[in-house]
Amino acid sequence: MEGGWPTRWQFLLCFIVSLLFQGRANSFTINCSGFDLHGVDPDVFQTIFDQKDFRPVINYSIPTHVNISFTLYAILDVDAQLQLLTSFLWLKMTWKNPFISWDPEECGDITKITVTTENLWLPDIFIVESTDVDQIPEGLSAYVNHNGHIVYHKPVRVTTICSLDIFYFPFDEQNCTFTFSSFLYTVENLLLGMDKEVWEITDTSRKIVNTQGEWELLGINKATPKMSVGSSLFDQIMFYVAIRRRPSLYVLNLLVPSSFLIAIDALSFYLPAENENRAPFKITLLLGYNVFLLMMNKLLPASGSPLISVYFALCLSLMVVSLLETIFITYLLHLATTQPPPMPRWLHSLLLYCASPLKCCPTWHWKANMDMGLISTHLPGLKEPGEPGKELGPREAKLNVGSGFTRAQLTDLWVQFGHMMDTFLFRLYLLFLSSSIITIIVLWST
Ligand SMILES: *[C@@H]1O[C@H](CO)[C@@H](O)[C@H](O)[C@H]1NC(C)=O
Ligand SMILES: *[C@@H]1O[C@H](CO)[C@@H](O)[C@H](O)[C@H]1NC(C)=O
Ligand SMILES: *[C@@H]1O[C@H](CO)[C@@H](O)[C@H](O)[C@H]1NC(C)=O
Ligand SMILES: *[C@@H]1O[C@H](CO)[C@@H](O)[C@H](O)[C@H]1NC(C)=O
């Protein structure tokens, strides 16, 4: 029984082969009377059409060589959520059918004819990564050359699995693989070769892809490892297609408006803290930013955590933090003007230290105070209690430093403190903002 199978197969093969080539073992030349004035006589090709279910070889131990090439015509969709790349390819396959040949000199200089693909044996080349049935238009034809070369072009829309990394969105580059392989034929039956050099494929594809769409083609590389499944070995050609997103749409619609809003948020610290406009302004800005994010959400990748989402979250949290800061300063100033609490000694010393210009408080801040008439009471208020403060013993100072001040002086000191805090927090904010933006830009540019 075990020994019976191979012999039965051999017998079957011999039977098929002998059936196909009855009386034609030496010559497969087509009789030229088939090419007459009324076109091609289908009868002369009938024997070839009848063989289309079998791989066209004279000796079944010889593998069929199929040369392939493709032109990447368009990148239709890059789905980061499902990790799918949908692209449109013009696939070209060439192979040799040894049963077809005719002499063009005898046949009115006809060197090639077209034959519908339903009548020909076609290699079952498919793309390993594809997740969908190839959508090929029906009724395609192939060129059949007088020496048996068959050239078959087919347009295919393929959806392939591709490991997409959208961390650097919208400045991302992707590297997707198209692996062409036979579905059934092992290396003993079918070998793959290149119809064109890979640089030719790259050049023609780049010219076409780069004129349209969101993606530009960076390059195509190839590798030809054999794939072994169980005990059988399959020939395959892998093409690595590297593409890069054109970021201008996202820069204009996402990054620029967002940067403007965060810049306005930073500038709104220059609105005086005393007048009550700053908090409403920041709330409006926050609201505007949320509306912006809602509207632009559809431009963002649906999954993953790209750096740009971190950037948006950062901008949003900076706005919230700056709003909280404004609330705090407003509260402090309100407290200072209504019922100023006693001032701890260390705070007073700090204020004195900072009151000297060229130290931590900026000049614009003093100008702002002067405009509001606060400065008139500030400076004397600061200096006078400062001197007795030093003379006081530590015990008395601990009890109540503020007791030496009048209420107006205390208010001024607290207002002074509020402004100092405002400036300090603003600088902290600016420092954090610039460092995080620089970090993000550095990450993007690598
Ligand atoms: C070709 O076919 C025609 C008609 O079928 C026949 O008369 C002719 O002898 C054939 N020629 C050869 C070389 O077989
Ligand atoms: C088929 O090819 C193999 C290897 O080239 C050879 O050994 C064998 O004799 C061939 N068979 C025939 C029937 O020509
Ligand atoms: C396939 O490509 C090889 C190498 O370029 C070439 O020798 C061979 O003739 C080609 N085969 C076909 C069927 O085009
Ligand atoms: C794409 O990935 C493959 C292997 O993963 C690598 O050989 C190839 O160089 C990569 N291409 C580019 C352009 O990075």
Image (cartoon, helix red, strand yellow):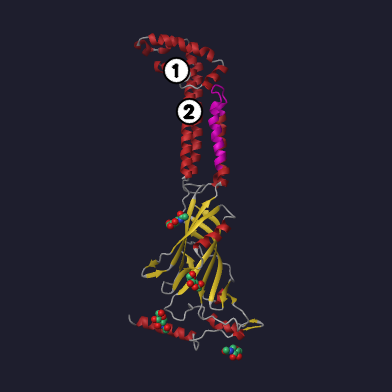
Please report the residue visible at 47 percent of the width from the left and 17 percent of the height from the top: 355
Q: Is mark 2 within 8 Å of ligand 4?
A: no
Q: Is 395 within the magenta?
A: no
Residue 233: horizontal and vertical position, in percent?
A: 39, 69
Nearer the observer, 288 or 236: 236
Q: Amino acid at mark 2?
A: Arg
Sequence-wise, the earlier of marks 1 and 2 is: 1
Residue 46: horizontal and vertical position, in percent?
A: 56, 82
User: Is the residue marked by circle 1 packed among few (<14), some (14-19), or many (20+) residues within 10 Å?
Assistant: some
Mark 1, secondary structure of its residue: helix
Name the quadrant containing residue 405: top left
* In this picture, residue 342 sits left or right of residue 49: left
Mark 2, secondary structure of its residue: helix
Q: Is 265 within the magenta?
A: yes
Nearer the observer, 306 or 438: 438
User: Is the residue marked by circle 2 packed among few (<14), some (14-19), or many (20+) residues within 10 Å?
Assistant: few
Q: Which mark is residue 35?
A: none
* Residue bearing mark 2: 427
Residue 189: horizontal and vertical position, in percent?
A: 43, 74
* Residue bearing mark 1: 351
Is the stretch drawn in magenta largely helix, strand or loop? helix
Residue 297: horizontal and vertical position, in percent?
A: 54, 45
The furthest residue to the front: 105
What span is in magenta?
254-280
* In this picture, residue 1 sits left or right of residue 417: left
> In the rendered view, would you say 113 is above or below 419?
below
Q: Amino acid at mark 1?
A: Leu
Name the quadrant containing residue 262: top right
On the question of residue 408 being in view, the answer is: no
